[in-house]
Amino acid sequence: MNMSTPTTDAPGIIAEDLILLDADLGADKNAVIERLAGVLADAGRATDSAALLDAALAREAQSATGLPGGIAIPHCRSAAVTTASLGFARVSPKVDFGAPDGDADLVFLIAAPEGAGAEHMKLLSSLARALVKPAFVTSLREARTPAEVVTLVQDVLAPKPAGTSTATAASAASATAASTPVSTAKSETPDTAAATSSSAPKHIVAITACPTGIAHTYMAADSLKDAGDRAGVTVHVETQGSSGSTALDPQLIASATAVIFATDVGVKGRERFAGKPVIESGVKRAINEPDTMVAEALRAGDDPSAARVSGSAPAAGAAASTGGLGWGTRLRQILLTGVSYMIPFVAAGGLLIALGFLLGGYQITEVAEDVVLNNSLQNLPDGGLATYLGAVLFQLGSLAFSFLVPALAGYIAFAIADRPGIAPGFTAGAVAVLVGAGFIGGLVGGLIAGFVALWISRISVPSWLRGLMPVVIIPLGATLVVGGLMFLVLGRPLAAITSGLTNWLNGLSGSSVIILGIILGLMMCFDLGGPVNKAAYAFATAGLAIDNEASLRIMAAVMAAGMVPPLAMAISSTVLRPKLYSAAERENGKAAWLLGSAFISEGAIPFAATDPLRVIPSMMAGGAVTGALIMAFGVTLSAPHGGIFVAFAMNNILLFLLALAIGAVVSAVLVTTAKQFAGKKDSELVDDRVAVAA
């Protein structure tokens, strides 16, 4: 095996044996990624090619990594990666990676260790930024040997002094710009940047960020800067990526014409841009349409009615605060933010309570508090150590669970009004618990707290009072308003709704309870971890706080249905008809056995992302069957997560497994039949031909 040692400051990032030139790697992107993952593993860069492949495909499922110009940059972090590495393939024929202008012939697999250091991340981001430079891309296409590709990439990662090739010079300039996490159009120091901003007629500030923080973050930054140069305006970009982030100079922000948020994740320090005209999109739009975004930002800067970043800055005025997003989308983001922050409390508290029941029995609820606070060991049912530990775990879980509704309300308010909304939101959630309004009260209270805090933040106040607004005036005012409304107006009606819903659930029987199970099963399998799935899961976990049989049956139905998709795809791809699937999909199927068993619905995403029309309806059918059977069997579950590993929290594990098996088999048969008779994809036909030839 030919291992060349790079002469850069980052030896080992790329070598000749990590490069494939003019290779036919298959008809789809999964096959290309699988081959490159194998190349990295063969070279000792990863301990497990399958784990690396799964991580790369999971990132691919979030959003396509194809870029304009025939380039693709699949990338991921994985514990299987031993050192930050680049695998490169110049493929023929080209392969579809989801780029808007066609297929890709240049593919970089960027693999980073789970805990990659800042220096490695800077090097990987330098490569990503160079890929938007035409000279560098042209040089890659013209390279005749792997050694030439290594040299080109090394010149990007550790640029040589000027005077080499044109491609090297262009790459060196890109790497120099990438050497600091914050990129400005002129690569200035903070002092010169401030001077430039005062002399330039206009400038724009921007934030770029993607979920992984390796590639798209930095490519979007360079695309916006280049678009600014073409438009005659300076664009200063703060890249919130894995190699770190240095905040934009506050003077630059204050004097900016507008701000661009090109992000797939939340903006860190969003309040710094309060009052600025804003253009907001996903990170890929900044790569694909940078000129359009810069033009929109310039127009927004001249438009008094343009959407603005919410907050208490003087320029906030009375403009809209939705950042250019529709209110339907914005409301969904707000509610999902609250649910996302709530779930850790649910998972930790629920599992601790379930472990408490396992060790101390269900009667532990009556004595746990006295045992833990007063060490009243004589009150234990059997006086044993296991029962005492059960009491401790139950009490700890109950305390964690008590934060469920306040956390939901607090972070809903946070999503609307940022940090000033947290205190009134948590207070609204606590009031909801006190008056018996529960989960529904938390939703309503969080929304009210957030919007009241946002409204107060827009009140124009003297400059001497602005410093007190976010830490005193906004939390105090919003807490008074939402607390008063919850106590005096909304508390009793919301408590009545919650009580009515509880009584309705307890009264369900026969066909009614089965219909509820079908609905929950369909929701859990519709988008595999998306908003609909999360809504069903949040409904079930909120019911755990009520702790009655109906709520525990709902939890069992939701968990069992959520386990169906990965298990069904595992059965179909590894047992029923493996030849219908690519090699990468078969590897995903092996991993899906464990993911499904642990109630990780996302294990089916790689299959659904490549073939949604046949996979998703099949999964929904099996999930509906399982949900209905769980309800009909009367299975209960007191743990919010864990799959078969929390069998101790079920009242009847055998019936749970029976319902799960029936639903998984139904889905597996349906998806296999659909793939067999509804027409095969090209990748499947290629895979079959290879199998036949073998």
Image: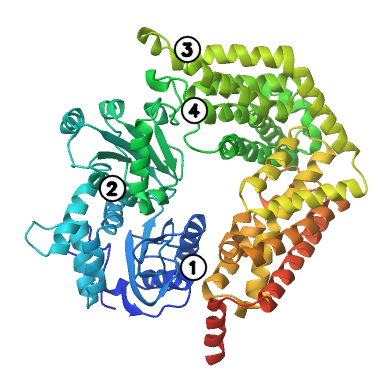
Residue positioned most to the left:
163
Circle 1 residue:
50
Up the image or down, 112 lies above or below 258; here it is below
101 relative to 511 in the view: left or right: left
294 relative to 411 in the view: left or right: left
The residue located at (42%, 59%) in the rendering is 65
> Can you tell which of label 3 and label 2 is closer to the viewer?
2
Circle 2 residue:
227
Residue 518 picture location, percent across and down: 80, 52
Please report contact status of discs 1 and 2: CB closer than 8 Å, yes or no.
no
Circle 4 residue:
320
Asked if one can make out residue 523 in the rendered structure from this viewpoint, the answer is yes
Marks 3/4: CA–CA distance = 24 Å
Specify which label sits upstream in the sequence, 1 or 4: 1
Specify which label sits upstream in the sequence, 1 or 2: 1
Front residue of this view, candidates 197 and 614: 197
Q: Image quarter for residue 240?
A: top left
What type is the residue that disc 4 sits on? Ala
What type is the residue that disc 1 sits on? Ala
> Can you tell which of label 1 and label 4 is closer to the viewer?
4
Specify which label sits upstream in the sequence, 3 or 1: 1
Label 3 secondary element:
helix
Residue 334 picture location, percent across and down: 57, 34
Circle 3 residue:
472
What type is the residue that disc 3 sits on? Val
The residue located at (26%, 63%) in the rendering is 12
Marks 3/2: CA–CA distance = 42 Å
- How dense is the environment of label 2, judged by Cα within 10 Å: few (below 14), some, or many (20 and up)? many
212 relative to 15 in the view: left or right: right
Label 1 secondary element:
helix
Up the image or down, 59 lies above or below 491; here it is below
Residue 441 picture location, percent across and down: 71, 25
